[in-house]
Amino acid sequence: GGMTWTQNNVFTTNYDVTSICFIDSQTGVIGREGGVVLKTTDGGTTWATVNNAHSRKISKIICLNDSTLFEIGDGGSMCKSTDRGDTWTLISSFEWHNTYEGIEFPSPTTGFTAGKNGFYKSTDAGLTWTRTAVITTPYTSNDFVDLSFVNTNLGYELSKYGFAKTTDGGTTWTSGNFGTTSIASAIHFTSADTGFVAAGYCDDYNPLAQKIFKTTDGGLTWNNTIGAQPGE
């Protein structure tokens, strides 16, 4: 899967697509700038705009299960859907003056998100959120871009130039880097030891500008698997 792709020009506005999440092979949602949410029920052939609860840029949408979805973005805008993305409700207990980039739910009830004001945790399926830490390590003092949690204790937070790791559910963090000056954009761990970071940018004229780093020792060391070597 994913070896070949077919372009689908179904959008009539110039808003950038910022996140995508599929509940199953046919049903998925896309988040865009301006708080626009679109939904497909035919595997992406057609898309329809659904009613969102705000008009700010959406940073990320996640599918918690076959009916519950979360979205997060600029201005502390967090929303929740319990009907497969048809309607969305603002979570009023969240901090509206912050900007958030990543959200993860490693269990049905425990979720995490990070922003420039700190790291936040929910233990009631996103109903309320508590700031548990302010991550001020050299690599993650601001410019948060993504999160990846293996379980409710072990997780990683990514900034543009490094990452931080927690083993106690976000109470304490240690910093690290993956050996490049390229701006990082995404992180994902498939197990406690194995993870990937995407950095750089997509450029038809310079394919080496896009880099994928891999670790097999829990972030202690990283190898560049695609693109130019670290620091180039």
Image (cartoon, rainbow, N blue to C red):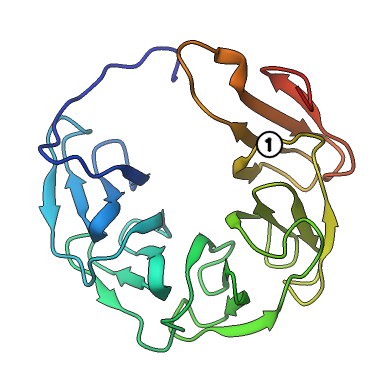
Q: Is residue 181 above or below residue 96?
A: above
Q: Residue at x 17, y 26 (%)?
A: 9
Please provide percent x and percent y for residue 208.
62, 15
Kindly indicate the quadrant of the structure image that contains residue 222: top right
Q: Is residue 160 above or below residue 107?
A: above
Question: For the C terminus, which image quadrant?
Answer: top right
Kindly indicate the quadrant of the structure image that contains residue 61: bottom left
Q: 60 or 155, which is in the foreground?
A: 60
Residue assigned mark 1: 196
Please provide percent x and percent y for residue 214.
75, 31
The reply, left or right, for residue 185 in relation to residue 28 is: right
Residue type at tag 1: Phe
The reply, left or right, for residue 122 in relation to residue 212 is: left
* Residue 44 in view: yes
Please provide percent x and percent y for residue 93.
42, 89
Numbered label tally: 1
Q: Is residue 194 above or below residue 73?
A: above
**Does dot 1 land on a helix, a strand or a loop?**
strand
Q: Residue at x 13, y 31 (%)?
A: 10
How would you rate the neighbour count of disc 1 (Cα within 10 Å): few for under 14, some for 14-19, many for 20 or more?
many
Please provide percent x and percent y for residue 177.
81, 45
Kindly indicate the quadrant of the structure image that contains residue 178: top right
* Residue 84 in view: no
